[in-house]
Image: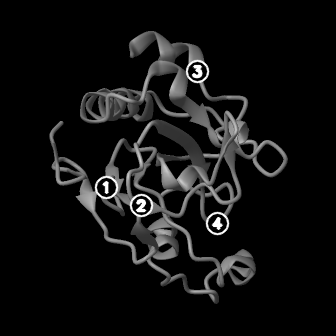
C-alpha cells in the first residue's frame, strides 16, 4: 500500500464532509479501532457510506432516524469482504472518537486515525479484514512514526463509559503479533 497526502492509493475514496483541520502542531500518534454495522447487525448494505456522507435515508430502516442528526466519519472502513474505503485524509481530523481521552490527553480525534471494521462487538471478524488491517497499520506506522504498537487501541479504551468496540471477538493478540 502507498499513502500520498494522507490518502491510501489502494483504498476506495468516498469523501466525507465530516472532518476539520487538526490543531496546529499536533502529532498523529494514536490508532483507534472501531466496529460499525448499519443497520445494526447487518453487513454489506452500503449504509455506512451514506452515514459518513450525511446521506442516510431515514425511511430505509427505523434505527436510522435515531442517528440521522449525527455528523460522524472515520478515516477508514474495512468491509467484511476486505474492501478498504477511505473517507477522510489522515492529515485531517475525522469525527470518529467523540468524547474521549488517552493517557490523560483529551479529544482523541485531534491526534488519532480512526479505522472502522464492518462488524459488531459480538461477532467474529473475517480473516480478510485482519489481513487488510495489518497492511493498513503497517503503512500508517511507517508514515506516522509516533504511533507505536502500544498506541493502537480500541474505541473502548478511549471512551470506556460509552463504547465497547471493537468488542470481545476482536483478535488483539493476532494484530499485535503481526506489527
Which of the two discs, 3 and 2, labels the residue nearer the N terminus? 2
Give coordinates of residue 148: x percent, y percent. 44, 23
Left or right side of 117 for 163: right
Which callout, 1 or 4, points to the residue nearer the camera? 1
- State the residue position of label 4: 39
**Is disc 3 placed on a helix, strand or loop?**
helix
**Of tags 2 and 4, which is closer to the observer?**
2
Residue 93 image position (x, y, % from top left): 43, 60
Contact? badges 1 and 4 (CB < 8 Å): no
Q: CA distance from mark 2 to mark 4?
A: 30 Å
Asked if disc 3 and disc 2 are in contact, CB closer than 8 Å, the reply is no
Task: Please give the residue where the numbered disc 1 appears in the rendered image.
Answer: 91
Tell whether label 2 touches label 1 (CB within 8 Å): yes
Disc 2 target residue:
22
- Mark 4 crowdedness (10 Å alpha carbons): few <14, some 14-19, many ≥20: some
Asked whether 116 or 41 is in front, the reply is 116
Q: Which residue is mark 3?
A: 172
- Gap between marks 1 and 4 measured at Cα: 29 Å
x 42%, y 70%: residue: 20
Residue 91 sits in quarter: bottom left
Q: Residue at x 73, y 75 (%)?
A: 63
Residue 33 x %, y %:
55, 40
Local packing at callout 3 (Cα closer than 10 Å; few below 14, some 14-19, many 20+) is: few
Where is residue 170 shown, x and y percent of the image? 62, 29
Q: What distance separates the C-alpha of mark 3 from that of mark 2?
A: 28 Å
Badge 2 element: loop
Q: Residues within 10 Å of mark 1 (few under 14, many from 20)?
A: some
Cβ–Cβ under 8 Å for marks 3 and 1: no
Q: Inspect this view and state whether residue 121 appears.
A: no
Image: 155 above or below 136: below
Amino acid at each position: 500500500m502507498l499513502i500520498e497526502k494522507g490518502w491510501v492509493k489502494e483504498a476506495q475514496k468516498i469523501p466525507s464532509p465530516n472532518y476539520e483541520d487538526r490543531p496546529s502542531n499536533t502529532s498523529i500518534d494514536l490508532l483507534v479501532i472501531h466496529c460499525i454495522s448499519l443497520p445494526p447487525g447487518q453487513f454489506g448494505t452500503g449504509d455506512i457510506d451514506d452515514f459518513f456522507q450525511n446521506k442516510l435515508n431515514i425511511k430505509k430502516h427505523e434505527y436510522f432516524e435515531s442517528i440521522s442528526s449525527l455528523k460522524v466519519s472515520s478515516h477508514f472502513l474495512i468491509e467484511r469482504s476486505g474492501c478498504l474505503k477511505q473517507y477522510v485524509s489522515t492529515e485531517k481530523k475525522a469525527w470518529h472518537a467523540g468524547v474521549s481521552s488517552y493517557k490523560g490527553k483529551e479529544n482523541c480525534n485531534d491526534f488519532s486515525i480512526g479505522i472502522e471494521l464492518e462488524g459488531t462487538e459480538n461477532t467474529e471478524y473475517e480473516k480478510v479484514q485482519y489481513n487488510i488491517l495489518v497492511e493498513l497499520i503497517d503503512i500508517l506506522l511507517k508514515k506516522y512514526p509516533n504511533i507505536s504498537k502500544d498506541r493502537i487501541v480500541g474505541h473502548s479504551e478511549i471512551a470506556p463509559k460509552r463504547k465497547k468496540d471493537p468488542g470481545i471477538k476482536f483478535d488483539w493478540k493476532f494484530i499485535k503479533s503481526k506489527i
